Amino acid sequence: MSFVLPAYRAPDFSRIDGPDATFVPAPGDRVAPEGYHALSIFPEYFRVGEQWLLCEESRMDCVPVLEPDGHIAAREFRTLRAGERVCVGRTEDGREGIYVHADGFAAAEVRRETFAFRTGRSRETACSHDYDELCALLRHEREHGRIAWVLGPACAFDAGARDAFAALVERGFVHALLAGNALATHDLEAGLFGTALGQGIYSPEGAPNGHYHHLDLLNRVRAAGSIPRFLEETGASDGIVHACVARGVPLVLAGSIRDDGPLPEVYADVYAAQDAMRAQVRQATCVICLATALHAIATGNMTPSFRVREGRVRPVYFYCVDVSEFALGKLRDRGSLSCRTLVANVQDFVRTLERGTR
């Protein structure tokens, strides 16, 4: 299957009658003016001096700021400074100089039956076409975009999935990896002990005193001072983390309140972790989240439905894969409306995807 980026259809502003947008100085640091406009995942335009300006890096739960050079920036509330000019207005149809363009990539309307079975996505929905489509997308994005992955620890619990994802890294299908302490810890544990949380990664047998393994691993890495130094000292040569370090793939590990250890590279400051994640997501044109509800929702909140590359507006592809339909529904309920969901065991998913990209 070949892949072609869909064309973007900009709004016809000749049919939108509205005044210039209103920008009001922020009354204090980290405080937006009353009536501020909150950005969405969609392309948003603001009329300034009778021109409609696109906020090129829109992000949900941010506010649009008119910068001194005349462009519209998306800013988190916590980064606002007193006096910065923040757009106010709660309408989205141009009447306040604000226009949200939700269907710029919409395909021609396809006729559907009034009544039909299996039109949604569930564990019973066949997804062979999904794999073919995603493999074609990954081949395209490897050459023309940037692919960010968001992984839960289940991806390291199975030897086949662990090897398959490492192969994706080695073949250039991973440009950034976002995860928590657990994914990296159990992947490194698998390399050192052949277990994940004390259970074998190839068979379900538990190792004697296996519940110590992840703690012993954390202790060893902290003694080494860093993950790369640990890999060098142990001579480890397999796994997800090793592949990322060997290929220079950015690895952002965001800490949580329940972390043990953690690994030296884990961000303990939640806002530092958020900034590090945003730095990678801002470059991504394709995001794939596997078996991690909270990290997927966090990343989804950072990811718009589009990017501007070389003056061209193009879509951002956002996939989420989980064995739980509830987790996927929760992500969509949090505003990631452009997310494509697949109900699948992520270990099987990764192995199938790796075979399809060979």
Image (tube, rainbow, N blue to C red):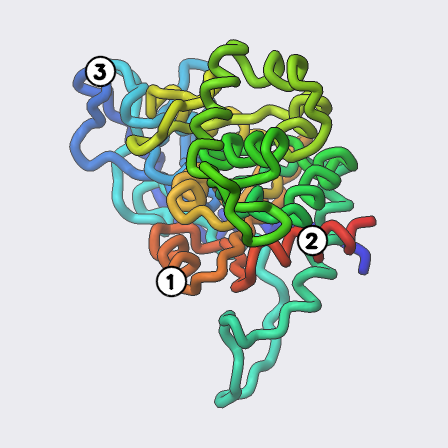
Q: Earlier in the sequence, mark 1 or mark 3?
A: 3
Q: Please give left or right for residue 105 compared with residue 23 in the image.
A: right
Q: CA distance from mark 2 to mark 3?
A: 48 Å
Residue 29's disc number: 3
Q: CA distance from mark 1 to mark 3?
A: 38 Å
Residue 235: x percent and y percent? 70, 19
Residue furthest to the front in view is 208
Residue 352: x percent and y percent? 71, 57
User: Which is closer to the viewer, label 2 or label 1?
Assistant: 2
Residue 351's disc number: 2
Q: Please give left or right for residue 328 compared with residue 134 in the image.
A: left
Q: Residues within 10 Å of mark 3 (few under 14, many from 20)?
A: some
At 49% from the left and 40% from the top, the residue drawn is: 208
* Residue identified by numbered label 1: 326
Q: Are marks 1 and 3 in contact (CB under 8 Å)?
A: no
Residue 313's disc number: none
Q: Earlier in the sequence, mark 2 or mark 3?
A: 3
Kind of residue sitting beneath label 2: Arg
Residue 168: x percent and y percent? 72, 41
At 43% from the left and 64% from the top, the residue drawn is: 325
Q: Earlier in the sequence, mark 2 or mark 1?
A: 1
Residue 149 picture quarter: top right
Residue 202: x percent and y percent? 64, 49
Q: Quadrant of the N terminus?
A: bottom right
Q: Give the SS element for disc 1.
A: helix
> Foreground: 304 or 357?
357
Kind of residue sitting beneath label 1: Phe
> Foreground: 296 or 227?
227
